[in-house]
Amino acid sequence: MTQADGELDGLVRQRIRALRVAQGWSLEDLAGRTRMSPSSLSRIETGQRRLALDQLVAIARALDTSLDQLVETDTDDVIVNPVLDGAHGLMRWSIKAEPGMSVVRQRITGPPDDPSRMRAHAGHEWLVVLSGTAVLLLGNRRLRVEVNQAAEFPTMLPHAIGSVGGPCEILGIFDRDARRGHPTDD
């Protein structure tokens, strides 16, 4: 076994224990869901028993995760730096786990677009106001979103966002389809 194999082995064992504990389950609880003995599970978690594929599949299923997630090794790029778009006043971070999703930090200085120019497109957006007060036009609703409040909506609803009483800063998360619906943000 190479050092990398040993590190993966230890990581998988830590994940099993952490997922079990996060569920609030004892070894007996997990044993009942995997049809394994509590002592076998204990030895798996502590490294005293070899990991077998059939056992890992049963454990992953019982812990409501996938085998892929249980053995995932791509944890090198934890820190993600933003891409700056000065022309639009944006900072954008890509979300590696969900290709096509992005996080955008944006400063908004004016009122929302004229309601006749609101956009609608496929997708889903989530935003949180970091500073100031945002105004979200959503269908025929006008919503004030204050600091630390969030809004989540399907982007098939006609929408526009602006600020009231001065500039505001938002952090938005766009799924792949919603991002495509904002071509000026790219």
Image (cartoon, helix red, strand yellow):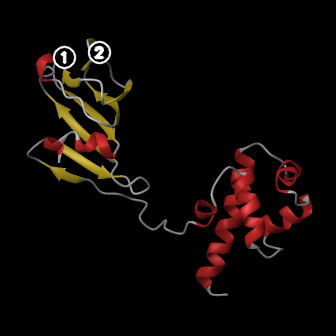
The image quarter in which residue 40 lies: bottom right
Depth check, front residue: 103 or 98:
98
Mark nearer the N terminus (2 vs 1): 2
* Residue 14 visible here: yes
Q: Position of residue 89 (x, y in %)?
A: 14, 41
Mark linked to residue 16: none
Dot 1 surroundings within 10 Å: few (below 14), some, or many (20 or more)? some
Amino acid of disc 2? Arg
Depth check, front residue: 180 or 45:
180
Q: Position of residue 5 (x, y in %)?
A: 63, 80
Element class at badge 1: loop
Q: From this viewpoint, which residue is outermost toward the left?
A: 87
> Can you identify the residue that label 1 sits on?
164
As drawn, 129 above or below 76: above
As drawn, 138 above or below 21: above
Residue ID at (88%, 60%): 36
Amino acid of disc 1? Val
Q: Position of residue 70 (x, y in %)?
A: 63, 62
Residue ID at (73%, 44%): 23
Residue ID at (29%, 39%): 178
Dot 2 surroundings within 10 Å: few (below 14), some, or many (20 or more)? some
Q: Is residue 124 left or right of residue 158?
A: right
Depth check, front residue: 86 or 120:
120
Q: Position of residue 116 (x, y in %)?
A: 12, 18
Q: Is residue 185 left or right of residue 38?
A: left
> Can you identify the residue that label 2 sits on?
144
Question: Contact, CB < 8 Å: mark 2 with mark 1?
Answer: yes
As drawn, 175 above or below 129: below
